[in-house]
Amino acid sequence: MNLSSNHPPNRLVSKSPHLQVSPPPSFPVTKSPRHQVSPSPRRPVAPSQNRVVITGMGVVSPNAIGISDFSQAIRTGTCGIRFHQELADLNFACQIGGKPEIPDEKLKEYFTSLQLKDLNASGIKYGVIAGIDAWKNAQLPVGKATTDYNSGIVFGTGISGVDKFREAILKIDAGNVRRLGSTAVTQTMASGISAFLNEKLGCGNQVTTNSSACTTGTEAILMGYERIKNGQAKRMLVGSAGDAGPYIWGGFDALRILPRKYNDDPTKASRPMSATAAGFVPGSGAGAMVLESLESAKKRGATIYAEILGGSINSGGQRNGGSMTAANNEAVQRCIKETIWSSGIRAEEIDAINGHLTATGNDPVEIENWKAALGLERKNFPFINSLKGMTGHCLSAAGSIESVAAVLQIKEGFLFGNSNCEDMHPEIEKLILLEKVLQKTIDFQPKTIIKASFGFGDVNACLVFRRL
């Protein structure tokens, strides 16, 4: 499986040697983001492909923990961005951030006293809670005595256990290697999150961790999707986590890409698509989904949240305007077009976009890329929203948390409003109708939502959710 190729990821070899699956079309390159192109043609569907559905979800977000509370929070526009004295004490210019608040009593529901004794990795805490909640939400057993070879885990992270790293470095530099404790390795290895989860779940299929900057969560979902679609697993727990705190957020503060004027008014700081957007607010947390073959889900009578129709992962190669911190717009548009093609839909069928939209000067560019890739007239552009006005940018956890939000909209029949963009960026106003950027939550029955993530290193991931 090669998810990073320039072609749609779901090119399968049929079980029948006589079936020929036609190659993907050659996508036109849009030289100007404002140029409109025809929607991508439908993909061929190989009979051997499994359909993939979502049967469970869990979330640990700055504005809520648990699916029910999270759904209520995004409906009401509840913001989880707060002032953090620790950042002020460390002379950060941006002293605010999105950090989930987890009571000690709740942690005891997921970890033993021994596990909690020296557990310093916030991302592992977030990921385990979200992952176990998703598993239970899917009505699957926790703590089975036997290995389940039909189930696997792909749970991503940007970096794991930075606080534990700091603790370990100080002890090593002081000559106290023997005082590191028995969990220094498991808390700091990138795959620690998947390993902690699997200790509780006993999955025998692929158990791994991915890491692709801000696309990590969306990529993890697509990796699990591919495995089930190819018949290599019946179900996969997928998602991602992002640690919190100064050792994660400090580099971004040094880059001067975080807002510095909202320390006294944190809920107004994250302003996607706003003319007064001043940079992204750092966030953290975890989102998780249980993906399952439609056949397996129906057989056990599982609740189905939505179906994943397809997706794409690519890179701009840090060429043609792309760099370590900027996107190659041609690659972004290609990723969106390939996603539509691999999903077997037309652009006109998309009811809403859940964008990456980080509250930086690049938000208008992202809208231009969506408009060019979809090839739709201004009046036909879908609704578009960004969760980051409520949570900040949760970095490696962003794609998974935002995907949970996207699927909740499909399942529960609403579209959440965008926070802090009452002063729409004038360049965005030129591209799409103001009414497509909702200021308040509306009752709506979206059938199809497309979600995208774009990350440092010029990497992109996009997928389509549909009501079954």
Image: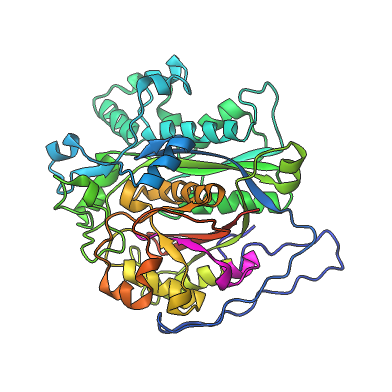
Left or right: 231 with respect to 254?
Answer: right
User: Which residue corresponds to the image point at 42% horizontal and 46% vertical from the top-left?
Assistant: 397
Q: Judge whether residue 329 can be spotted in this image.
A: yes
Q: Judge whether residue 6 can be spotted in this image.
A: no
Vertical side of 310 occupied by 283: above or below: above
User: Which residue corresponds to the image point at 52% horizontal and 32% vertical from the top-left?
Assistant: 133
Q: Quadrant of residue 172?
A: top left
- Taking depth in this image into account, of 317 and 227 the one nearest to the observer is 227
Vertical side of 366 occupied by 37: above or below: below
- Residue 261 point in image, percent of width and height: 14, 53
Q: Quadrant of residue 344?
A: bottom right
- Residue 148 point in image, percent of width and height: 70, 32
Magenta span:
340-357
Query: Is 416 inside the magenta-drawn segment?
Result: no
User: Which residue corresponds to the image point at 38% horizontal and 67% vertical from the top-left?
Assistant: 435
- Residue 258 point in image, percent of width and height: 22, 54
- Taking depth in this image into account, of 411 and 316 the one nearest to the observer is 411
- Residue 315 point in image, percent of width and height: 47, 66
Vertical side of 445 occupied by 241: above or below: above
Q: Which image quarter is the N terminus in?
A: bottom right
In this view, the residue farthest toward the front is: 443
Q: Quadrant of residue 337?
A: bottom right
Vertical side of 74 occupied by 200: above or below: above
